[in-house]
Image (cartoon, grey):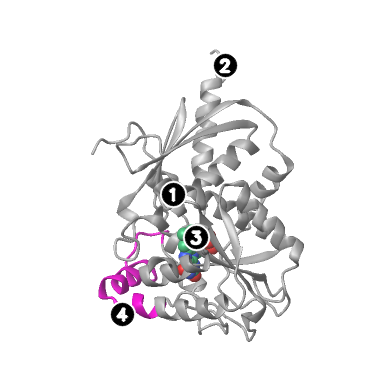
Amino acid sequence: MTDRQPSQSDELLTAYQRAAEIGGRAPSVHNTQPWRWLATRTGLQLRADRSRQLRAADSEGRLLTISCGAALHHARLALHAGGWVPQVKRMPDVRSADALAEITVSGHGTATAQQRRLFDEIDVRHTDRRPTVERKVPHDALELIRQAAADEGASLHWLAEPDLDDLAVAAARANEIGLADAEQRAEMDYWIGGTRPARTGVPSDAVPQTAPQTDVPGRDFGRPGTLDTGHGHARSAVYGLLFTSGDQPGDWLRAGEALSACWLKATDLGVAVLPLSSVVEVPATREILRRMLAGAGYPMLVLRFGLADPDQAPVPGTPRLPAERTTWPGQIPQP
Ligand SMILES: Cc1cc2nc3c(=O)[nH]c(=O)nc-3n(C[C@H](O)[C@H](O)[C@H](O)COP(=O)(O)O)c2cc1C
């Protein structure tokens, strides 16, 4: 029997498959995991999986594409950590809005210290919907988080008074509008505690038991979960508006890559993150956010940053689909 040495193309296939698997650990709206990967010996393709799009709340696919961008950034980090230098072609096929990225590698390379650190945070990062502690995130940490987003082509605008008051009103209004709309309500009921596919959606133990005390309300899931929110008040949290210079699918993808980068950086610095996306879903409240940017760009997501209470138990991890549900074994099926 001869021992066949793995060829470079075998090694590459394994690296692309691993990148797709790590990409699947990314955050996504309602944990829909709306991505599909095709790993071959010549590259890794990322496509949108519209079967897991929030058709009512996210009809344009902005939040779906932001989620896929976060997965793309995770996959890139996995390749760096594996000793490869990834190259990415974003929106590679003008005829297909679902083709989001093609990743290849240009050769071997050593990951930078920053890439290594962000990679190491992938399995630590999570969404924390509990109030943050009453101590400000240090300014230096906020600057590093802002820089991590900027490195990926998106900007974080820190919100101060009077915009913070407007955000609080807009977030409450967006929650009301979402819950009053029958289709959006049904969609949320499906993904949060409903008959969603196994290992998707937001599990009950990640949904607050009672409304957390805060000036700016987080998403109202319309049902209580089992997450103990404690007695704190999130009044020391800092809110950042993630925005891009354009509002096209390519910009949404970049915003997702920046979301992943700044969230992993925050995790590395011990800063808890909570995205607030209902204010972006509702056109009227998205317009309020756009005015806060005074022409500088288009709102993608509001992010709450704060110090987590060290005495609280860790939030249980949310499940992810097995790789066979998010990858194609062979050719991408033609529509
Ligand atoms: C684009 C996007 C929008 C999100 N919007 C919200 C939101 O409005 N409220 C919320 O509580 N979580 C939000 N999340 C967090 C997801 O629910 C979370 O990432 C997912 O359930 C997986 O959990 P994990 O982040 O703990 O891994 C959002 C995440 C993404 C990527």
Residue type, numbered disc 2: Asp
Circle 1: element type: loop
- Name the quarter where the C terminus is drawn: top left
Name the N-terminal-most of marks 4 and 3. 4
User: What SS does tag 4 mark?
Assistant: helix
- Marks 4 and 3, Cα distance to the nearest angstrom? 31 Å
Q: Position of residue 167 (x, y in %)?
A: 51, 76
As for residue 1 lying within the magenta part, the answer is: no
**Amino acid residing under circle 4:** Ala
Q: In the image, is the residue at mark 3 within 8 Å of ligand 1 by its beta carbon?
A: no
Residue placed at 35% from the left, 61% from the top? 58
Q: Which residue is mark 1?
A: 322
Q: Single out the mark in the foreground, 3 or 2.
A: 3
C-alpha gap between disc 3 and disc 2: 63 Å
Q: According to the image, label 4 marks what residue?
A: 180
Q: Which residues are magenta?
A: 175-200
Which residue carries the number 3 mark? 295
Q: Earlier in the sequence, mark 1 or mark 3?
A: 3
How far apart, in angstroms, are the residues tagged by discs 4 and 1? Answer: 34 Å
| Foreground residue among 90 and 133 | 90
- Residue identifier under label 2: 3
Above or below for 309 versus 113: below
Q: Would you identify the image quadrant in which residue 100 lies?
A: top left
Q: Residues within 10 Å of mark 3 (few under 14, many from 20)?
A: few
